[in-house]
Amino acid sequence: MTQDITTQEAIKRLEQHFGSREGMLTHNLTMLSSSGQPADITFYRRKPLINVQISTKIAAARLYGLEDQLPKILKCIPFSNGVVASLAEIWTVNPMPIGGFTDEELAAVDLAEGEERHGPNGETLRKMIRKTYQCKSRKETDFYLRRWIAS
């Protein structure tokens, strides 16, 4: 059985479980670090990283009880494409499937879902994707929206 809840209630529940937005991001980065599953990482002040893996350093620190090392690691998170970023720079972590998508899978995505209102202030999914992925055109927005819906 599913239960419909408001966006504000969902945010409240996430904060109760993870303690903060940063706590949720750290949890997601840890899970992806341990599994090797790729993700799209968006930032407040730079272009997103697409289909990258998160360094195993995060998972290793947690697995081996080196929690005291975690703040240092989270200041310089290495990604599989060579880019390094701090947790404070990250806006969203969007897990993607291992193996990615085929062109056919992305073409088959129904973009109508992008017009649904999902944001905390009633924003459409399209608007949130355009903003977080820092898209400059409708074509670019459609590309990232297809990835997000397909994921």
Image (spheres, rainbow, N blue to C red):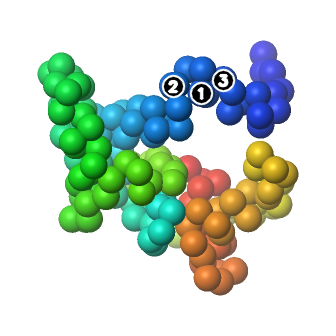
**Kind of residue at badge 2:** Phe
Q: Position of residue 54 (x, y in %)?
A: 29, 48
Image spot of residue 45 (x, y percent): 48, 69
Q: What whole-number distance in Å separates the C-alpha atoms at marks 2 and 3?
A: 9 Å
State the SS at label 1. Answer: helix
Neighbourhood count class around disc 3 (C-alpha, 10 Å): few under 14, some 14–19, many 20 upward: few
Q: Nearer the viewer, residue 82 or 16?
A: 16
Which amino acid lies under the numbered mark 1 shown in the image of this protein? Glu
Query: What's the mark number on residue 15?
Result: 1
Dot 1: few (<14), some (14–19), or many (≥20) neighbours within 10 Å?
some
Neighbour tally class for label 2: few under 14, some 14-19, many 20 plus, Cα within 10 Å: some
Is 5 left, or right, of 34 in this rendering? right
Residue lying at the far top in this picture: please name it.
1
| Residue 109 vertical position relative to residue 69 in the rendered view, above or below | below
Dividing the picture into quadrants, the one containing residue 124 is: bottom right
In the picture, the disc for residue 18 is 2
In the rendered image of this protein, does residue 57 appear above or below residue 9? below
Mark 2 or 3, nearer chain start? 3
Which residue is at the front of the view, 43 or 52?
A: 43
Tally of numbered discs: 3
The secondary element bearing badge 2 is classed as: helix
Circles 1 and 2 in contact, beta carbons < 8 Å: yes
The image quarter containing residue 113 is: bottom right
Residue at 64% over, 67% down: 131
Residue located at (81% from left, 27% from top): 5
* Residue under pointer 3: 13
Q: x and y percent of residue 139 in the render?
A: 65, 81
Secondary element at image label 3: helix
Q: Are marks 3 and 1 in contact (CB under 8 Å)?
A: yes
Task: State the residue at coordinates (51%, 51%).
Answer: 92
Separation of residues labelled 3 and 1 (CA atoms): 5 Å
